[in-house]
Image: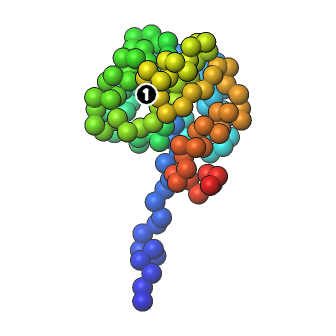
Amino acid sequence: MMDSRADSPPPTPNRTVLLIEDDRDICEIVQQILSDEGYDTITVANGAEGLAHLRSSAPQPFVIVLDLMLPVMDAWQFRAEQAGDAHLANIPVVIFSANPKVGQHADTLGAAAVLRKPPNLEELLSVVSRFAQGASPAAPV
C-alpha cells in the first residue's frame, strides 16, 4: 500500500499575523516578539492599507491585530468593511489599544480578544498562539 503523504509535502501552517498599527515603535516591538516565536508579521499603518493587503494575493493571516485609533480608516470603519466581505469576515480580530474603554469598544466591534498597550510579552504571545491553534504544530494544545 502506498503512503499518499510521500506524494505531497504536508501543508505549511499559516504563521502570518496582520498588525494594523500606526505607531512604528510598537510595530517594531510586536514584529520582533512575534518573529522570535516563528510568526510572520505584516504591518500596515491604517485600516485602508490593511484591507488592501487582505484583498491582495498575499497569504491571508490567521489573525488580525487592530489598533482602535488609526489615520485614514479607523477600527470601526475597517471592521464594517471586513464584516461585509465574505472572504475576510471570518478572520479573527484582536483589538489592540491603550484606550481605557478598550473592552467596551472590542465588544462593539465584535472582536475575538483584546490586547492592551503597551503590549505585555506573555499576554501578546498567549493571545496570538490561541488563534494559531491548529495552524502550527508548535502551538500549545
Name the colour scheme.
Answer: rainbow
State the residue in front, 117 or 103: 103
Q: Residue at x 65, y 39 (%)?
A: 126
Q: Quadrant of the N terminus?
A: bottom left
Give the image quarter of residue 123: top right
Q: Position of residue 19 (x, y in %)?
A: 52, 28
Q: Residue at x 54, y 46 (%)?
A: 132
Question: Can residue 18 be seen by looking at this rendering?
Answer: no
Q: Position of residue 119 (x, y in %)?
A: 67, 25
Q: Position of residue 38 (x, y in %)?
A: 62, 45
Q: Is residue 131 above or below residue 44?
A: below
Q: Quadrant of the C terminus?
A: bottom right
Q: Residue at x 54, y 35 (%)?
A: 41
Q: Residue at x 48, y 64 (%)?
A: 10
Mark 1 Cα-neighbour bin, 10 Å: few <14, some 14–19, many ≥20:
some
State the residue in front, 119 or 41: 119
Amino acid identity at mark 1: Gly
Question: Can residue 90 be seen by looking at this rendering?
Answer: yes
15 horizontally vs 83: left or right: right
Task: Give the residue at mark 1.
Answer: 110
State the residue in front, 28 or 107: 107
Residue furthest to the top in view is 71
State the residue in front, 78 or 57: 78
Give the image quarter of residue 114: top right
Give the mark count: 1
Helix, strand, or loop for circle 1? loop
Residue furthest to the bottom in view is 1
Q: Position of residue 108 (x, y in %)?
A: 44, 21
Q: Is residue 34 above or below residue 140?
A: above
